[in-house]
Amino acid sequence: MIRVAVVDDEPLARRGVIARLSACEELVLAGEYIDGPSALNGLSAQAVDLAFIDIQMPGMSGLDVLAALPPAHRPLAILLTAHDSFAVRAFALNAVDYLLKPVDDDRFAEALQRA
C-alpha cells in the first residue's frame, strides 16, 4: 500500500484529488490538510509515501512545506497549482510531477504512474 496525503486549501480541489485516488486500490489516504502549517505538522508526525501538494496556500506554501521537511523524511511530491512559474523550485525539491489546475484525468494518471 502507498500512503498518500492531499494538501490543498481549496475544498473542491482536495475532493477532486481524493476522488481520483479512491479509484486506485494500492493507494490509501493517510492525511488531508487544508494549509501549509497543518501539512507540515501532519507530515512531520506521520510519514507518507506520496503527497499531492498545492503550492499557493495560506500560512505557508507547499514548496515551503517540502523544504522544511528533512530530505530523508520528505515524501514523493506531486505539486498542484494554477501557475507554471513555480516549476523550477518544485523540481529542485525533487518533485515527481507538476500538475496545472484544473487537473485533467490523463495527466493525473500519468503523474501517479511516475510516482
Image (cartoon, rainbow, N blue to C red):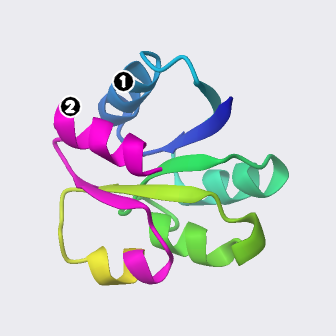
Q: Residue furthest front?
A: 113
Verify CB contact (< 8 Å) between mark 2 and mark 1.
yes
Say what secondary structure mark 1 lies in: helix
Res 89 quadrant in image: bottom left
Q: Quadrant of residue 70?
A: bottom right
Image location of residue 109, percent across then percent down: 30, 36
Between 111 and 55, the one nearer to me in the picture: 111
Residue 83 lies in the magenta stretch:
no
Q: Position of residue 74 (x, y in %)?
A: 67, 65
Q: Is residue 61 visible?
A: no
Q: Which residue is mark 2?
A: 105
Sort mark 1 into few (<14), some (14-19) or many (20+) by Cα contacts within 10 Å: few
Of 36 and 28, nearer the camera is 28
Kindly tell me whether residue 30 is visible in this rendering. Answer: yes
On screen, 18 above or below 58?
above
The CA distance from mark 2 to mark 1 is 8 Å
Relative horizontal placement of residue 16, taking residue 67 as reference (left or right): left
The residue shown at (39%, 43%) is: 113
The residue sitting at 40% across, 51% down in the picture is 114
Side (left or right) of 10 relative to 66: left
Q: Which residues are magenta?
A: 91-115
Q: Please give left or right for residue 96 compared with residue 88 in the image.
A: right
Look at mark 1 in the image and give the residue it sits on: 20
Task: For the N terminus, give its image quadrant.
Answer: top right
Amino acid on which disc 2 is placed: Asp
Residue located at (29% from left, 43% from top): 110
- Name the residue at 70% across, 76% down: 71
Residue type at tag 1:
Arg
